[in-house]
Image (cartoon, rainbow, N blue to C red):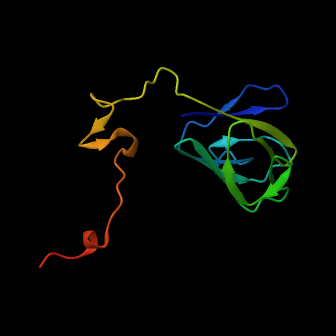
Amino acid sequence: MLAQLIPESGAPPITLEASINVLGRSSRLCDVILDDSSISKMHCMLVKTDGLIYLRDLGSTNGTRVNGQRVIRGALLPGDQLAFGALGFKVHFGPDQGSRPVLPANPRKKNGMDASQSDVRLLGDSDFLLPD
């Protein structure tokens, strides 16, 4: 999944390359450098997962805001307004460039299961019992 932070200032977008990204002012400690005095050395962490970005403020001085609300942690959705200190961004998601989803040969069935269930199945109590 392509995940970007689009600066309100009109600067080039910041692409979140890694699954876990630490944002802040320190070039030694952070993956994404935000060079502004309102940003803490280690300001926040963004974690990319399937279709979401999870945010965790790392005790920053000036805080992290999502859609104007100061937050400590939360999930970001496409179009959310994100602010670190005095810097503002818009959250953008999209498909990876050049990547295509891999589908099973018969998309309706996969290992005898509906494709919509993928590899997830419900476990019953008997699945946790040890064999005799």
Q: Position of residue 36 (x, y in %)?
A: 83, 42
Judge by depth and name the residue closer to the eye, 62 or 123.
Answer: 123
- Residue reaching furthest left? 132
* Residue 130 falls in image quadrant: bottom left
- Taking 122 as reference, is 60 left or right? right
Residue positioned 88% across, 44% down in the render: 86
Counting from the top left corner in percent of width and height, residue 35 is at 79, 40
Question: x, y (%) of residue 5?
Answer: 71, 35
Tell me what residue is drawn at x 75 percent, y 41 percent: 80
Q: Quadrant of the C terminus?
A: bottom left
| Residue that appears at 25% across and 72% down | 126
Q: Position of residue 107 (x, y in %)?
A: 33, 31
Q: Is residue 16 above or below residue 56?
A: above
Observer able to see residue 104: yes
Q: Relative to residue 26, is residue 128 drawn left or right?
A: left
When the figure is inspected, residue 26 is found, relative to residue 101, above or below; the finding is below
Q: Residue furthest top?
A: 98
Choose top left, top right, bottom left or bottom right for residue 32: top right
Number of numbered discs overlaid on the protein picture: 0
Horizontal arrangement in the rendering, residue 129 relative to residue 83 (left or right): left
Whether residue 31 is situated above or below residue 40 in the rendered picture: above
| Relative depth, front residue between 114 and 103 | 114
Residue 53 placement, left or right of 129: right
Please report the residue visible at 68 percent of the width from the left and 55 percent of the height from the top.
74
Q: Is residue 56 visible?
A: no
